[in-house]
Amino acid sequence: MKTGNHAFLLVGGLLVHGAAGAAGQADDSGYFAEMPVVLTASRLTQTLDAAPAAVTVIDQATIKASGARDLASLFRLVPGMTVGLYNGRKVTLGFHGLSDPYFRQFQVLIDGVSIYSPMWGGAEWSELPIAIEDIERLEVVSGPSAAAFGANAFLGVVNIITRDPATESRFEAISNVGMTGIRDGVLRIAGNDGDLRYRLTVGQRADRGLESYPDDRRGTFVNLRSHYRLGGQDELRLQAAYIGGMTQNGAYSDEPNPVNGPRDGNYDQGMVQLRWTRVQGADEEFWVQLFHSERSHREAQPYSLILPRPFGTWRYPLSFDYSYRRDDLEMQRTHRFSPTLRGVWGLQGREDSTQSRVYFATGSAQHSTLYRLFGTLEWQPAPGWTVSGGAMWEWNNLSENGASPSIALNHQFLPGHTLRVRWAEGRRTPMLYEERADKRYELPAGLRSLLQAQGSRLANLPLVQSTLARDALDDERIQSRELSYLGQFPDRHIELELHATEHRLKRLIGLYDYPVDTAMGAFDSYYASTRGFRNDTSASIKALTGSVRWQPRRETNIRLALSRTTIDARGADAAAIEESGPRHTVSLFAMQNLPGAWQVGAGYYRVGAMRTMSGGDLLSAVDRIDIRIAKTVQWGSGKAEIALVIQNATGGGPLFERDDVDRRTSWLNLRYTY
């Protein structure tokens, strides 16, 4: 409790300082007059109080003031979301539970395009080919959004919306230098020449991660966003990105081994998006989009296979190589039918493929194909009333086909005060690995020959069978109900949101053990079984969340987010699922502009006791404080800024296992813009 008290005192000082001048600013209410506009809740542009789902918006000013180096850490500002690390590098996420290094129940978009991994699910959060400075805002939708974005928009969606080049400075250079080997550098240039506008970003990220794991990383990335106006109504947009580098993923084993060392992996990822858009009015738009992405991961681990006598010791290099690619074609039409009725609909086709001899026991590519038809209508039958309904029909070759509907009713019963009720369904399609996993290790050639010479049946068995999918999997399913209140109090410069949500989850996919014949199983019963995937658990998640944004004066911005979650699960993984989310989360963030071009940003985050799935320890509640102090000066024709960022200012806490402590880290952030 001491840490929590200190945190509230720290941020409370900023609150008091900001409130001191609020009374004298009462006539300056124009800066806090309108609800934010969001794009992700239904594919229609809507104000927050007219959207058919709860949306958390994290804007550019908040992103900068937070001092975040990586995108995932910003999710601590979202009520009910948890963030951790697995093996020091792999980001773990949860949203009212189901926290996991492979958080598959969360759709991930960059500018509306899915970057959800077809092999593992989720996203490679530490290896995205964008700089934090490229982001205009994050929109995080709570609850199933399958009607808008299809399967895997299960517990939520994040849309990473990048900055339009028209809003950019001509040149920006950023550098981070600090503890744990932090060495980041980013160069950004932007231009606007008649019909062409563009932004190019080049950068690198490097650090040594946690003390408890080999988890160094180095990455170099480049991305381009460009727009070319073809005429009065038509525009062509090209976005391209690449990232490549090295990442360590812990050690292969905790057991002593003469050559057991860090898992050093090298990766490359590229993506390109081409969109043609025709805009004929505010609600009259048509676009067609092509998207292609590829990723490869190469990792070989030298290892010694130590067997009982008389079989001896064998050199046994381990491989963790894999690759995947995605090709996607999508088209969308937005149309206003009347002053009170508008809609959006479209088509999408996608082909995913993955390849890995170690994970699928074949060099052949594994394919996944889907087709989608989606549509949403927004109807305003009377002033203050909005009805939003939508559905998406999907066909895929991995599991069942079907529709995911949603409907919401918003009623503005007083100016600035809205009630919303929502019902939605969604699904999550099994990943290619869940559906077709065959992760095995074969006998070394010399050992196989020795066993064959002895006439042993072990010569025909795999050395170890780690995972073998044998069950036909169904889609995970979710039904969700939500009751929300959204209020504005302009005289006090406050926005308030309250949400009560119930998710009913069925046919959740989990791992189970079953016996299998292996060569190692003849010597050690631990290796006489393998793991498969099956639909065997259901759960009910009930969540109460609240958020407040208070801007007592123009220079002060404060946001508070609270959540209370109860999970009741049934089935083989019931205990793990019930512990996979904390009962309570708190985030309190304050941003204060001070005289002399100083700025302070401070965040306090508390996560209750929980256990991350996939092998995490049961961890007690953790408090965290992050601070950023910045000073801006005029330098020539531009502006220079120096900032000190301190994360885990109170010392840090465990993230996945008790020994995985994310300790206090600090660095200097240098920035020059003109």
Image (cartoon, grey):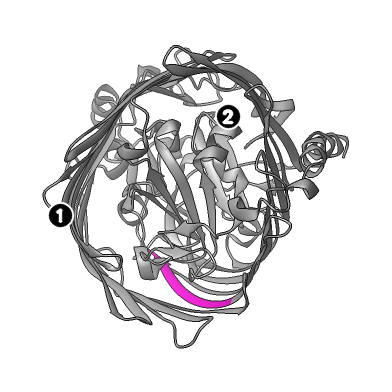
Magenta segment, principal secondary structure?
Answer: strand
Above or below residue 494? Residue 612 is above
Residue 149: image quadrant is bottom left
Please tell me which residue lies in front, 103 or 372: 372
Q: Inspect this view and state whether residue 394 appears.
A: no
Instruction: Looking at this view, name the residue that lies furthest to the bottom.
Output: 381
Question: Which region is colored magenta?
Answer: 420-428
Q: On the picture, is 52 further left or further right than 327?
A: right
User: Where residue 617 sits: x, y (%)?
Assistant: 67, 41
- Which residue carries the number 1 mark? 232
Above or below residue 225? Residue 612 is below
Please tell me which residue lies in front, 104 or 213: 104
Q: On the picture, is 242 further left or further right than 548?
A: left
Please tell me which residue lies in front, 54 or 19: 19
Q: Secondary structure at mark 2?
A: loop
Amino acid at dot 2: Gly
Earlier sequence position, callout 2 versus callout 1: 2
Quarter of the image containing the N terminus? top right
Q: Secondary structure at mark 1?
A: loop
The Cα atoms of the two marked residues, 2 and 1, are separated by 40 Å
User: Where residue 459 sits: x, y (%)?
Assistant: 28, 35
- Which residue carries the number 2 mark? 67
Amino acid at dot 1: Gly
Q: Inspect this view and state whether residue 673 appears.
A: yes
Q: Dot 1: few (<14), some (14–19), or many (≥20) neighbours within 10 Å?
A: few
Observer-side mark, 2 or 1, equals: 1
Residue 264 is one of the magenta-drawn residues? no
Above or below residue 318? Residue 355 is below
